[in-house]
Amino acid sequence: MGVTTQQLLQPHMGVRLPADVRRSLIAMGTACNQSAVYLQAVSAQGMQIEAILEAQRAADCAGTPAPQAFTDLQRLTDQHFEQAIVVLARAATVYAVYATQVAQAVVADEMPPPPGSSVILPSDVIAAWGHYLPEVRFSSDGDDRVASEQNETVAHARRTLSELITDRMQGDPASAYDDIATVTVSDVGGVNRLVEFADALHVYAGVLVWALGVFSGVHPEHAGTAGGR
C-alpha cells in the first residue's frame, strides 16, 4: 500500500489560533509529509532491488556473486522500510493527538493548548485510541453543508483508523512502532508492522487539522473556498 501526503494548515485558515499553535501544527504536518515521502522512496527502492533479483533468477545467475549482494541489499532495504514505518507512525501519533487536543478546544470555544511535554507513543494510541483520539464534531458556523461535510470526512478517517486497530492489530506487539532501534535485519518478517496504520494516523490528523482550520477562522477573502480540500 502507498502512503499519501496531507495538506497543511493554510495561511488563510485558522486565523483565530495562537501563533505558536499554528506553527506547531504546521511543523508536525510537515514532519509527517516528509516521513511519508521518505517511506514511499524506500518502498520504491525495495521494488527496484526485487526486480533485479527476479531478472537474475530468470537468467539463472544463482551461482554468481552478484545475486548474494542484491539479496543482502534486499534484506537491508526491508529493514529500512520497517524503520521508515516507525518514523511515520511516531510523527503521525504526535500530530494526531495534538490536533485532537486543539480541535477539542476549538469546539469548546476555549484557548487551544500548546504542545505538551509528555511523549505519546504509537503503542499508547493502539492501546487506548478512544482516549487519545476522542470523537470531535464541529458546530455549524452558518453553513450546515460545510459542517456536515467536514464532520463526515473527519469521522470517516477516524473510523478507518479505529477499524484498523480493532480488526487487524490486536495480538501484535504495539511497541513495534515506538522505536526504530527495535528494527533489526533478523526482526524483519517476524513482526507485522502495518504501513496502513502509520498512513491512517497521518490521514486522520491531516483531515482533522483542515477541519479545525475551517472552524477557527478563515480570512474573508477565502471564506467561500475553505470548506473543500
Image (cartoon, helix red, strand yellow):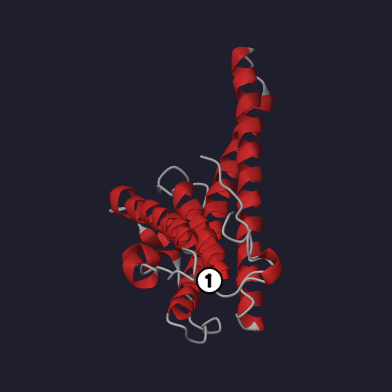
Q: Residue furthest bottom?
A: 111
The residue lying toward the viewer, choosing from 220 and 47, is: 220
Dividing the picture into quarters, in which one does residue 57 lie? top right
Question: Residue 96 at what x, y percent from top left?
Answer: 49, 66
Q: Residue at x 60, y 21 (%)?
A: 54
Question: Residue 29 at what x, y percent from top left?
Answer: 61, 64
Q: Which element carries disc 1, helix, strand or loop?
A: loop
The residue lying toward the viewer, choosing from 202 and 184, is: 202
Residue 159 visible to the viewer: yes
Residue 169 placement, left or right of 196: left
Q: Please name the residue that numbered disc 1 is placed on.
A: 215
Position of residue 186 relative to residue 31, above or below, is: above
Q: Amino acid at mark 1?
A: Phe
Position of residue 225 relative to residue 195, above or below, is: below
Position of residue 85 relative to residue 130, above or below, is: above
Residue 11 visible to the viewer: no
Question: Residue 209 at what x, y percent from top left?
Answer: 54, 66
